Image (cartoon, rainbow, N blue to C red):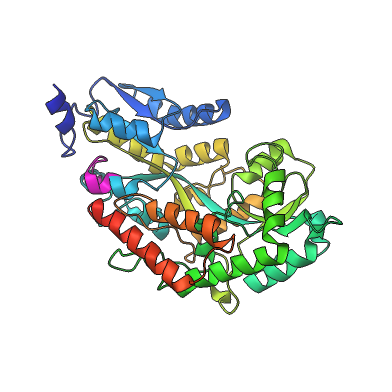
């Protein structure tokens, strides 16, 4: 039985037909009451269209649970993940089925999705995932703390304004940060900020490109320069003093930060937790002299697919197709979660109901200048390693030779990729 379960659905042609009476099990990661309701609301239309298919939704699932279920030969029929980090690994290993036969048979036009989204749902030509809503990053600014200044469009403007708006205590520690550059500050992680500088992460042949990419060095030098202006000890004290990212103690919501890079979901948190904060949003600044790139940003998103061993792959595909390509379903889900719709038609749907500040993120998502981190066979290991390097070595000032340290990091990243079949 285990052997047959492991191979079921691997070709996209086995299992009962989609019009047969059956039950499919769908695993997802959402757990909060409003999130679970949003998912259920999005699925309602599928249930009406396919009364023969009973959909069992299982909440609060993680990537590890998904992987273990697939390895154990008893996976659900549909799986989803909040992150694109594991797409390369799942596609490369076949843990998530190649959806190309399904897409071809259903005549799904991939031009429904922006280019960056098409990229982060495949690995080396194997498309094992479909996009299920998206996240786009931009600049949030507190209008009261901006004191009449317009949001910066370049890194130079951001740096000058960050210094101008910073308020220090008498002992020099930070009372209000104009902009906190540290990679340890919530969504200011390396993949979000270095991408704004144009970091490409890998060479065309899939090798780590940290030492060879001028954009990476530009990001690092800017990061260290602004941290040194604040004083590293002051940065550490500030980071320890601020609240939790997803609680009302968030420093932007508390007026302790004038500007910050964050995802579109912050609009919903501000609406619910800090409705009195008068704020605006704009695309993230770009390096000086690269004005043509302004308007883009870092994007990523939730992905959904059919695992190897799914017992009802035909019905599973009908579910995945509906949830990711039906405009009403996509918009219903986006409205419920406060996320960016992942298809171009949904972005302009009159059903989309978001606050005015959300428009920035819709535009960032559509922008040809937006980018994401490329997939590898071992997920986001290269990002994890670079994040650790920046926060543990670079920002504290422990690096004596930038080029040599980045080359060493490249070597370690490449070794890990090779071990995982890259």
Please report the bounds of the magenta region as a residue range.
90-99
Vertical arrangement, residue 59 with respect to residue 113, above or below? above
Q: Quadrant of residue 168?
A: bottom right
**Residue 251 in view, yes or no:** yes
Quick check: is 9 in the magenta stretch?
no
Residue 115 % position (x, y): 40, 60
Task: Using the image as rendered, state which of residue 371 and residue 44 is in the foreground.
Answer: 371
Name which residue lies at 25% across and 40% down.
95
Q: Quadrant of the N terminus?
A: top left
Name which residue lies at 40% across and 54% down.
117
Name which residue lies at 35% across and 58% down.
413
Secondary structure predominantly adopted by residues drawn in magenta: loop
Residue 131 % position (x, y): 40, 46
Vertical arrangement, residue 301 with respect to residue 13, above or below? below
Left or right placement of residue 138 versus residue 117 in this view = right
Q: Residue furthest bottom?
A: 289
**Residue 365 in view, yes or no:** no
């Amino acid at each position: 039985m285990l052997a047959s379960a492991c191979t079921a659905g691997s070709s996209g042609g086995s299992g009962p037909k989609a019009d047969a009476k059956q039950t499919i099990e769908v695993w997802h990661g959402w757990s909060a009451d409003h999130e679970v309701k949003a998912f259920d609301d999005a699925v309602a239309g599928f249930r009406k269209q396919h009364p023969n298919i009973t959909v069992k939704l299982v909440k609060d699932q993680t990537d590890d649970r998904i992987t273990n279920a697939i390895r154990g030969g008893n996976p659900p029929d549909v799986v989803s993940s909040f992150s694109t980090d594991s797409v390369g690994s799942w596609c490369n290993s076949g843990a998530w089925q190649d959806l190309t036969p399904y897409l071809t048979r259903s005549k799904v036009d991939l031009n429904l999705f922006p280019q960056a989204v098409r990229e982060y749902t495949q690995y080396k030509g194997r498309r094992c995932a479909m996009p299920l809503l998206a996240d786009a990053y931009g600049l949030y600014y507190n209008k009261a703390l901006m004191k009449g200044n317009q949001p910066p469009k370049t890194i130079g403007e951001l740096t000058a304004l960050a210094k101008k708006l910073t308020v220090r205590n008498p002992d020099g520690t930070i009372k209000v940060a104009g902009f906190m550059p540290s990679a340890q500050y919530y969504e200011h992680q390396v993949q979000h900020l270095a991408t704004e500088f144009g970091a490409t992460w890998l060479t065309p042949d899939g090798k780590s490109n940290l030492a060879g990419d001028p954009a990476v060095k530009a990001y690092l030098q800017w990061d260290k320069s602004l941290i040194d202006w604040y004083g590293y000890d002051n940065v550490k004290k500030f980071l320890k003093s601020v609240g939790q990212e997803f609680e009302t103690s968030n420093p932007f919501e508390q007026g302790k930060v004038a500007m910050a890079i964050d995802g579109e979901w912050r609009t919903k948190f501000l609406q619910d937790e800090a409705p009195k904060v008068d704020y605006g949003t704009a695309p993230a600044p770009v390096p000086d002299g690269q004005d043509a790139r302004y308007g883009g940003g870092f994007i990523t998103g939730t992905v959904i697919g059919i695992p190897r061993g799914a017992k009802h792959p035909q019905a599973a595909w009908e579910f995945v197709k509906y949830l990711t390509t039906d405009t009403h379903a996509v918009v219903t889900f986006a409205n419920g979660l406060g996320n960016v719709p992942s298809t171009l038609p949904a972005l302009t749907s009159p059903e989309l109901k978001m606050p005015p500040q959300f428009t920035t993120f819709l535009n960032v998502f559509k922008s040809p200048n937006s980018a994401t981190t490329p997939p590898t066979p071992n997920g986001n290991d290269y990002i994890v390693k670079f994040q650790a390097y920046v926060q543990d070595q670079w920002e504290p000032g422990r690096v004596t030779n930038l080029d040599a340290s980045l080359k060493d990091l490249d070597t370690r990243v490449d070794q890990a990729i090779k071990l995982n079949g890259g």
